[in-house]
Image: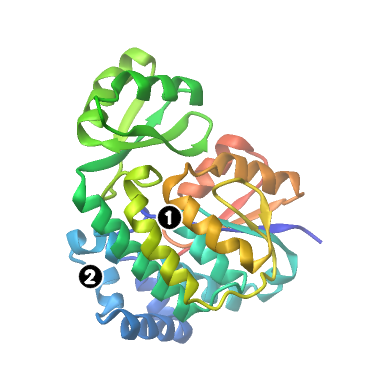
Amino acid sequence: MPKTALLFPGQGAQAVGMGKGLLERSAKARELFAEASSILGFDLAKLCTEGPEAELHLTNNSQPALFVHSMAALAVFLEDKPECLDSVAAVAGLSLGEYSALCAAGAISFADGVRLVKERGAAMQESASAIASGMASVLGLEESQVAELCDLARQPGEVLQVANLLCPGNIAISGQIASLDAAEQLAPEAGASRFIRLNVAGAFHTDIMKPAVERLAAAIAQTNLQPLRFPLIANVDAGEHRVPSELAGLLTRQMVSPVLWEASLRKLLSLGVDQFYEIGAGRVLAGTLKRIDRKTPCECFGD
């Protein structure tokens, strides 16, 4: 039997129109969007399918939108391929996508997942609004070179650091705007092929998010965490985790720690995974896998 892994995208994958195909096709998808809308207090399906774009890109909206879209996509995926659950070796999600992965593994209910990402998004939006900051992808450099670029560009008293180790040659950095501006100017000289600002509200996975940690921890403490049906490969250490008591620490650490996505994919490959599925918006995760292992297939399932 093949070994499969389910991957779930993170913030930045959102786009107006997401979910339209799922809603048209599946009663279960419509049910999930309706349940989420009731919890959130606004029409999530309308926001996802019609926008406005600026509203969808707000952190407190994009995080629930991506979570619900991934869960709706998973429901439709399993309607088509129910046998896949028997071959799942592990799950993983990029940043926000870790909540989708946990829901897929049965650690949190759908309703609790919506509540958690709503609280996470609101807390991160609040932290981001307090300090002008952001993220950028640096292409074409190794981790040590990106770290050196951050050291050179970091302005006095500011934060600028590696935030997401996505795949070879694609590393995201987070920090305050003046430091990011300096990094953008220095990047070509450092050998970077591209410097791309990311469509996020702030410097995620840095200490700038520290004020959000306490708020998220309180929300997690109110959540009924269940044993995982299959292990989570966690962002913060690329290790296998099944025990509910470990989850609160993993999720709160993730807010202020780099995402070890390349290491997570390599861990999944070392477990013998020979078929990946990216469940949700976009195709970013399939692209990162291709940079690591071109032979192992990754099928994308969104709309």
Residue at point 62%, 38% (across, down): 294
In the image, which disc is placed on residue 144? none
Sequence-wise, the earlier of marks 2 and 1 is: 1
What secondary structure is marked by label 1? loop
Report whether residue 62 is seen.
no
Q: Position of residue 113 (x, y in %)?
A: 46, 73
Residue at point 57%, 43% (across, down): 289
Residue topped by disc 1: 10
Amino acid at circle 1: Gly
Tally the numbered discs. 2
What secondary structure is marked by label 2? helix
Q: Position of residue 227 (x, y in %)?
A: 67, 72
Q: Is residue 237 left or right of residue 191?
A: right
48 or 123, nearer to the observer? 123
Q: Position of residue 16 (x, y in %)?
A: 27, 63
271 or 303, nearer to the observer? 271
Outermost residue toward the top? 189
Image height check: is 143 above or below 281? above
Image height check: is 154 above or below 291? above
Q: Quadrant of the N terminus?
A: bottom right
The answer to which image quadrant residue 63 occupies is: bottom left
Viewer-nearest of discs 2 and 1: 1
Residue topped by disc 2: 50
Residue at point 30%, 36% (across, down): 175
Q: Is residue 95 left or right of residue 291?
A: left
Amino acid at circle 2: Glu
Q: In this view, does 151 lie to the left or right of 76?
A: left
Q: Please tell me how crowded label 1 is: few (under 14), some (14-19), or many (20+) other residues with Cα within 10 Å.
A: many
Image height check: is 177 above or below 280? above
